Image (cartoon, helix red, strand yellow):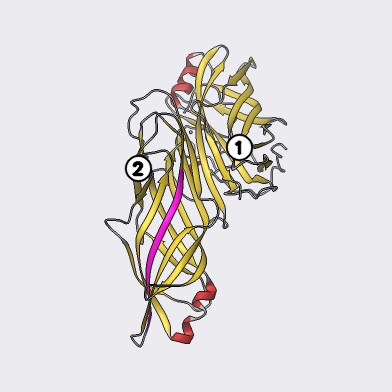
Amino acid sequence: MRWTQLSAGAPWTPGRRNGGARPYRGRLRTLLVAAAMLCGMLAVVPPAGALPLKDVPEVGVDTGRFKLPIGCTISMAGLPFFYLPVDVDVQGVAPVQLGPGQEFWLTQGSGSITFPSWLTALAPLLGLSKADAKITDLSIGASTSTPESINIAKDRPFEVKDIKIDAGKPLKVGLPLSGTFDVGPFKAAPSGATTLKFDRALAEVDLRSDAGFSLPIKADCKPSAGNALLKIAIGGPAGQPPAKIKDAPLNFAEPETNQLIGIINAPYACTLGGEPMDIGVAVGGHIPLTVKRGGTFSFTESSGALTVPAATVNKLIAKGHTKIAGRVTTLNLRVEGGTPAVQNVAAAGIDIPETTLVRDRKIVVSLPAGGTLTAGPFTPDAGAKSVAVLLGEAAASFTFDDGTPATGTCAAPSPKVYLVENPVT
């Protein structure tokens, strides 16, 4: 029931916030590994198993890609004809925390709906070779927020022409055909949390033959299991500026069905040598989107990164330090609605490689230097409707240039930082 570090040479894959002084306390969400970067002038190649440095977002940013199983009612001539299970693939960027009443967006959005291969296998029987598609409803929800759902295709439907139909192969309709979309603004509630989710998609598809014959169908698609994409806690001072994040890295491979791949860079307020310091801990990995009642789930192919903002680096340099190294000893994951209630994924210790400090330059350090991590398994409580995993406390020991030791401790992020909330199905 703790993160299990694999051998340093084992392959791994990345998956899914502000900075201060000590390189630290890994806050990994179910991952922890990250990419070491001598922030300075060197471009360091990440070791095997580390998050690619170019993919680690800024502190306070959550990036992810989700593949949700949905079900579509297929209608012809206005009459329901059959029910079709499909997948919707969505990716985007959001803040990891919100203030009371704060405006926010899901940005850099894109995705696709994939119709199964058995449907296109029927195409030769009717001579169908191409398809035109129009998405008139693509609704993304944010529970407790205002509004609670936004149809981004309401005023400007997504249209895709001349999609080639390959018999026996899945038919994928991109959303949009090029570029990205933003969903918002939403307005956060005064307190609590909001959950971003896929609500609905409505597609009009015209299947065409080279001979001029066409077969128009309509697909009304809704979630078939859990539809939660990510949960964002609300807290802190009111009056925070709108959270509309741009230019975050999104380089995720296509997930398996009912899975997310993401990276969260969470802000931690820490104490090192009696002084306050801020840092960011990025975590990424592969995480299921639902859990069956009586079942379990784990985070796999996980890794993480420690971000030391430039302001924190400058504080350390002002104390006469030029290099720092250490070892993470605590990184607690806390569980709501499941067991274990707390899991220290760094119980075995994770080394922080020696890193050179360069004034006015942030540092991103791999934790661990190689290999992958696993968190879980997590088991739903009896009667729980969902299981949420969030970042808890962290601690690390440090050694500076002259060998002087120091201990750093970090409280759990406030507001909370959720790694995932899985509906129990």
Q: Give the secondary structure at mark 2.
A: loop
Q: Mark 1 points at which residue?
A: 32
What is the spatial separation of the Cα atoms under label 2 and label 1, in whole angstroms? 35 Å
Look at the magenta stretch and give its main secondary structure: strand
Q: What stretch is highlighted in magenta?
A: 196-209
Marks 2 and 1, the one that precedes in the sequence: 1
Percent x, y of residue 348: 72, 31
> Which of pointers 2 and 1 indicates the residue nearer the eye?
2
Residue type beneath disc 1: Leu
Image check: 103 left or right of 82?
Answer: left
Residue 48 vs residue 160, the one in the foreground: 160
What residue do we see at 41% from left, 47% from top?
141
Number of residues whose C-alpha sits closer than 10 Å to that of mark 1, classed few (under 14), some (14–19) or many (20 or more):
many
Residue 402 vs residue 81, the one in the foreground: 81
Q: Is residue 178 visible?
A: yes
Position of residue 116 relative to residue 195, above or below, is below
Percent x, y of residue 177: 36, 62
What residue do we see at 51% from left, 68% from top?
84
Position of residue 184 relative to residue 67, above or below, is above
What residue do we see at 47% from left, 64% from top?
72
Q: Residue 123 in magenta?
A: no
Q: Residue 207 in magenta?
A: yes
Q: Name the residue under label 2.
A: 147
Question: Residue placed farthest to the bottom in the image?
Answer: 211
Image check: 375 left or right of 304?
Answer: right
